[in-house]
């Protein structure tokens, strides 16, 4: 007997972003400070956890599937942001934020004043890597793979 794909997709849609968020928060306990683009990657995961939790309500299979698929889209959005952020870190392209973009003289003073108020965390320099893959890279890989799994599994029905 095959397992119901929607059940597995619901679990992935809930547990994957929750685990990635827990990993991000845990890295902060070990001294890593998230940059602006790191926070961008977290917002779709927060929403995905909430939407995926709704997929466990007894609303009927079609509604549950819509919630799961929407959570999958949110997870994919975080993965896409992770691809962009990783590309900025690997210097494949330039970032669009103040923590990566070149600044003019007037902006440099604003940036200096901001840096004096709090630590400046650069978006184009990974704070940690494993096998040459940054945290943004891992988010991209895991999020996009998870989204593909959700989209593939959610429509499958159990067979006896």
Image (cartoon, helix red, strand yellow):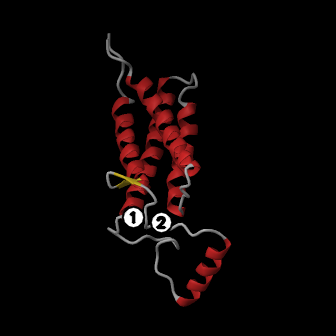
Distance Cα–Cα, label 1 vs label 2? 7 Å
Q: In this view of the protein, which residue sits in the foreground, 80 or 38?
A: 38
Q: Position of residue 68 (x, y in %)?
A: 47, 34
Q: Quadrant of the C terminus?
A: top left
Neighbor class of circle 2 (other Cα within 10 Å; few <14, some 14-19, many 20+) is many
Point 38% across, 59% down: residue: 86
Q: Are marks 1 and 2 in contact (CB under 8 Å)?
A: yes
Q: In this view of the protein, which residue sits in the foreground, 81 or 121?
A: 121
Q: Position of residue 55 (x, y in %)?
A: 53, 30
Point 41% across, 44% down: residue: 143
Residue 123 - label: 2
Residue 50 - label: none
Secondary structure of residue under mark 2: loop
Q: Quadrant of the N terminus?
A: top left
- Name, please, the residue furthest toward the right: 117
Answer above or below: position of 128 versus 94. Answer: above
Q: Position of residue 33 (x, y in %)?
A: 56, 58
Q: In this view of the protein, which residue sits in the foreground, 59 or 119?
A: 119
According to the picture, the residue beneath numbered tag 1 turns out to be 89
Q: Position of residue 77 (x, y in %)?
A: 44, 51
Neighbor class of circle 1 (other Cα within 10 Å; few <14, some 14-19, many 20+) is many
Answer above or below: position of 65 versus 116. Answer: above
Secondary structure of residue under mark 1: helix
Point 46% across, 71% down: residue: 96
- Name, please, the residue furthest toward the front: 30
Q: Earlier in the sequence, mark 1 or mark 2?
A: 1
Q: In this view of the protein, which residue sits in the foreground, 159 or 80?
A: 80
């Amino acid at each position: 007997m095959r397992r119901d794909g929607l059940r597995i997709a619901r679990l992935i849609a809930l547990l994957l972003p929750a685990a990635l968020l827990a990993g991000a928060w845990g890295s902060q306990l070990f001294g890593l400070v998230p940059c602006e683009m790191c926070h961008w990657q977290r917002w779709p995961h927060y929403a995905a956890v909430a939407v995926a939790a709704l997929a466990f309500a007894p609303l009927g299979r079609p509604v549950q599937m819509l919630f799961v698929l929407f959570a999958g889209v949110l997870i994919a959005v975080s993965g896409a942001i992770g691809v962009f952020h990783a590309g900025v870190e690997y210097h494949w392209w330039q970032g669009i934020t103040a923590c990566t973009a070149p600044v003019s003289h007037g902006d440099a003073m604003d940036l200096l004043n901001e840096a004096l108020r709090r630590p400046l965390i650069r978006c184009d320099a990974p704070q940690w890597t494993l096998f040459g893959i940054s945290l943004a890279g891992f988010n991209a890989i895991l999020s996009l793979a998870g989204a593909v799994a959700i989209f593939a599994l959610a429509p499958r029905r159990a067979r006896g």
